[in-house]
Amino acid sequence: DTEVTQTPKHLVMGMTNKKSLKCEQHMGHRAMYWYKQKAKKPPELMFVYSYEKLSINESVPSRFSPECPNSSLLNLHLHALQPEDSALYLCASSPNRGINTEAFFGQGTRLTVV
Amino acid sequence: GENVEQHPSTLSVQEGDSAVIKCTYSDSASNYFPWYKQELGKGPQLIIDIRSNVGEKKDQRIAVTLNKTAKHFSLHITETQPEDSAVYFCAPSSDQTGANNLFFGTGTRLTVIP
């Protein structure tokens, strides 16, 4: 199983809503990532978890709150978002054995903030 | 993160012709050089990668060449097919952090004309 599964595939939320994006992998990977991708732009790194601990936060606003409940799951909690936060949110995982290798990406959640 | 640029930003080729995309990076500590392909509505997927102890790697119609002195590496696609149409990203990184902190290049949209 080399899949990273993201749910939901599409999400529309109001600026006062609270919602969560979910990501799951069963490859035994110990590094997991959240990326944000705007149209016609490259993915931008948001957060990196290594062995279930947050290791990188790329100066992301606090209205985005990541959580790694266990080695297979990664969540992104959303609260009080702005319309400019509308984007494709991608989750990825990699082995994290100290040597950089392939990262596996999910298909993403298309988020629209209204 | 490091400064990563790709050229060209868009590329159109006739089916059967070759395509070359160049990635220039700034961090001299980079030692892992992957290329990702992103099709419409999907997450990026690794198509080929190379490490700094080799100068070239080939996998069927796809090859990557590395010039570490000049800090650039290139993706070569021969005998292009319509299914090669996608956006291609490079994502050079170093092992120093122990996890793939993938900072993507600016992207190249390849269109293969049947």
Image (spheres, coloured by chain):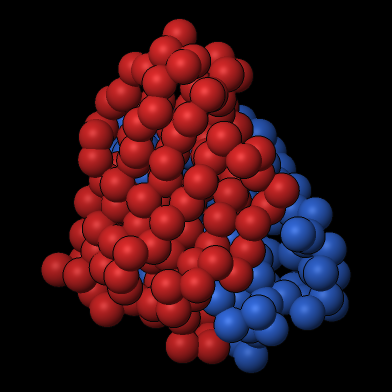
Q: Residue at x 78, y 79 (%)?
A: B29
Residue A89 appears in view: yes
- Frontmost residue, A16 versus A111: A16
Q: In the picture, residue A3 is in which quadrant?
A: bottom left
Comparing B92 with B57, the one in front is B92
Along the viewing direction, whichever of B83 and A86 lies nearer the viewer: A86
Residue A95 picture location, percent across and down:
39, 79
Q: Residue at 61% x, 87% y: name it.
A: B54
Q: How many circles with numbers are drawn on the protein? A: 0
Furthest-left residue in this view = A1
Q: Quadrant where the N terminus of chain A lies?
A: bottom left
Task: Write down the colour of chain B.
Answer: blue
Name above or below for residue A91 compared with residue B34. Answer: above
Horizontal and vertical percent for residue A2?
21, 66
Vertical comparison of A78 with B56: above or below: above
Q: Looking at the rendering, which quadrant does residue B27 occupy?
A: bottom right
Measured as percent of width and height from the top left, residue A52 is found at 43, 73
- From the viewer's perspective, tell me whether residue B78 is left or right of residue B22: left
Q: Is residue A30 left or right of residue A9?
A: right
Q: Residue at x 35, y 57 (%)?
A: A74
Q: Is residue B79 left or right of residue B34?
A: left
Q: Quadrant of the C terminus of chain A?
A: top left
Q: Is residue B22 visible?
A: no
User: For residue B64, which quarter of the picture?
Assistant: bottom right
Residue drawn where x is 74% and y is 53% of the image: B4
Residue B92 percent coordinates (x, y): 65, 66
Which colour denotes chain A? red
